[in-house]
Amino acid sequence: MKRIIGVMIAVLIAGCSTTPRVTTEIDALSASYDTSSDVVYIMPDKDISDGLQFEEFKRYVEHAFKRTNMSLAKDITEADTVVYLSYAAESGQRHQYTYSQPVYGDTGIESSRTVKEKVKDEDGNTVVREKTVYDRGYGIIGHTTHIGSYTTWPMRLRLRAIKDDKEVWVVVAVSNDTTNDLRQVFPAMLYLATPYIGNSTGQKIERVIKLDDPQLQSFKQGL
């Protein structure tokens, strides 16, 4: 529920910020493993085909590994650790929320004042008479309730490291935001997850980044 409310608030304030943000939940596990001496080779996990999309995402992962001082093997026979990469983008999820808007109108008499005016009496003579003028107010007189909606797209990436037939570390990053392009979201999720590669988060943690963040752009351009 907190996650849904957070996304809803982000949608409501979208007018203040035109750049989408990626909110990523990261869950990392490690067997007290030092990755700095690793020679790794990246392969598609069993649910991923070895195609152009995999090759694009693989380059991002290789760049992330270099930032953590891992060595990359050109061939699987040269590697002591194999990292299996998987990712997915699910169908959009539509969410509804209610919100109220004020209704403006006449709020009634707010004040009165006495004014003098010159008028003609029945005999045609000019006389001064007093009359009361009422000032009416204008403001909120009620509210109307409306229903709004927005769509989020769940996305996921997972890196799973195997050495000597044992899983030595795994990192899972999950996003569920209003951006529906995995090619934009994948490098953002990976960038946020990179500090936890080979480490343990102890629990699921949440990190947020804007898609135009300079550090993210530098990460992408460093390929």
Image (cartoon, helix red, strand yellow):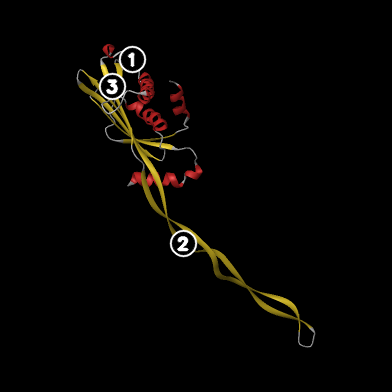
Residue 80: x and y, percent? 25, 14
Q: What SS does tag 3 mark? A: strand
Q: Which residue is mark 3?
A: 83
| Of marks 2 and 3, the one in the foreground | 3
Please give the residue where the numbered disc 2 appears in the rendered image.
143
Q: Amino acid at mark 3?
A: Val
Residue type at numbered disc 1: Ser
Q: Name which quarter of the figure residue 193 lies in.
A: top left
User: So how many labels did they put on this image?
Assistant: 3
Residue at horizontal 42 percent and vertical 31 percent from the top: 184
Screen quadrant of the C terminus: top left
| Outermost residue to the bottom | 123
User: As rendered, which of 148 and 80 lies closer to the eye?
Assistant: 148
Name which of mark 1 and mark 3 comes first in the sequence.
1
Dot 3: within a 10 Å radius of its alpha carbon, few (fewer than 14), some, or many (20 or more) residues?
Answer: many
On screen, residue 149 versus residue 120, left or right, reads left
Q: Of the residues tagged 1 and 3, which is closer to the observer?
A: 3
Mark number displayed over residue 71: 1
